[in-house]
Image (spheres, rainbow, N blue to C red):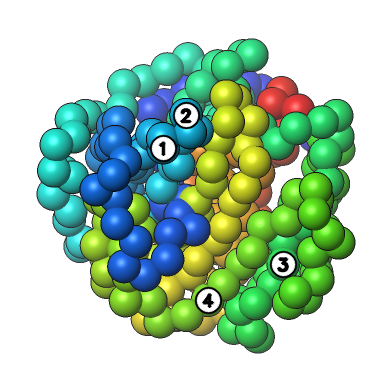
Amino acid sequence: MSRRTRLMTLLMPLCLIVSGALAGQSYAAQSVTAVYYSQGHAITVVTKSDGTSHVFVATLADGAKTPPAAGSGAVIMEPVECSIGGAYAHGQLCGVNRVRWSGWHPTIYFIDYTGADWPVYEAAVVWNQSTALNVGYRGPWACPGPGYNCVDVNALNYYDDCGPSAPPNTWVGCTDYTISGLTIVDANIRIDTGFTSNLANNQKVTCHEMGHALGLDHNVWNDSCLYYAPRMSTTVNPNWGDFAMLEDIY
C-alpha cells in the first residue's frame, strides 16, 4: 500500500453508534458520563457499576436530530492532532491512550447474521488487508468459542434505541462495545434495514461499522468508508489513512 504525503488534519467526530443494547434496555441504574454530538452522529458513554464503559456510537439517519440525554452534559468534540491521513482512532484518542482489542496482531471475527443485502464478507476481506491484525469472517453461530474476539453483525428493522441519545428510527448503523481500561472486551454491530439502500451504499455502511468495531473513529476524507456520512463516501473501502491508523494502534 503506497504512503501518500501526510494530509492536513481536520476535526470530524465519531460516526456510528456502537451498541449491543437490547430493545427496551434501561439505563436508569447506570451513569451517562458524556454525550457527544457532531454532524450526523451521536456518541454516548455509559459508565457501568463494574467500572467498565459502554460506548454507543450512532450514525443518524438523514435529517434526524436527537436531544441530549437527561442528566448528561452535551458537548461538541474539539479538534485533536492525532490523525494519520485524515483517519482517527476511537474517541480521537492519542498514542498509548488508544482503545484496542488485546494481544499482538489480534484476530477479530465478524459473525454474519445479516443476509445477502449486507456484504459483510466482502468488507471483511478488505479489512483483512491490514497487516496490523487479522480479520476473519464466519457465518451465524460460528464464533470459534469463548475467549475469541467475535463481533456479531445483525441487520433487522429495529424499533429500539442505540444508546440513550439515539432513539428508534433515528440511526442507520449502531456499533456498541464494552471497554475495560483501554481494552475492547466485547462489540456488536446492528444495521437498521429500514434504511436499506443499494448494494454499494449498504457496503459503505457495513465497512464503516466494522471499522469502528476494530477501534477506528471517522476519517475526514470522503475517499474512505469511514467518512462521517458513509453513504456520501466515494468508495466502499477504507483508505490508506485507515490502514495506517490500525498500524499505529496495534
Query: What is the spatial separation of the Cα atoms under label 3 and label 1, in whole angstroms?
Result: 26 Å
| SS under mark 2 | loop
Dot 4 or dot 2: first in sequence order is 2
Question: Split into 4 quadrants, where in the image is the N terminus?
Answer: top right
From the top left corner, tell me how far across and down residue 226 is, in percent: 53, 48
What amino acid is labelled 2 in the image? Gly
What amino acid is labelled 4 in the image? Ala
What amino acid is labelled 1 in the image? Lys
Q: Is residue 73 above or below residue 145?
A: above
Q: Which residue is mark 1?
A: 48
Q: Cβ–Cβ below 8 Å for labels 2 and 1? A: yes
Label 3, residues with CA under 10 Å away: few <14, some 14-19, many ≥20: many
Query: What is the spatial separation of the Cα atoms under label 3 and label 4, in whole angstroms?
Result: 12 Å
Q: Is residue 216 left or right of residue 76?
A: right
From the top left corner, tell me how far across and down residue 111 is, in percent: 72, 67
| Residue 85 visible in the snapshot | no
Dot 1 or dot 4: first in sequence order is 1
Q: Which residue is mark 2?
A: 51
| SS under mark 3 | strand
Residue lying at the far bottom in this picture: please name it: 116
Q: Which residue is mark 4?
A: 155
Dot 3 or dot 1: first in sequence order is 1
Dot 2 or dot 3: first in sequence order is 2
Query: What is the spatial separation of the Cα atoms under label 2 and label 1, in whole angstroms?
Result: 5 Å
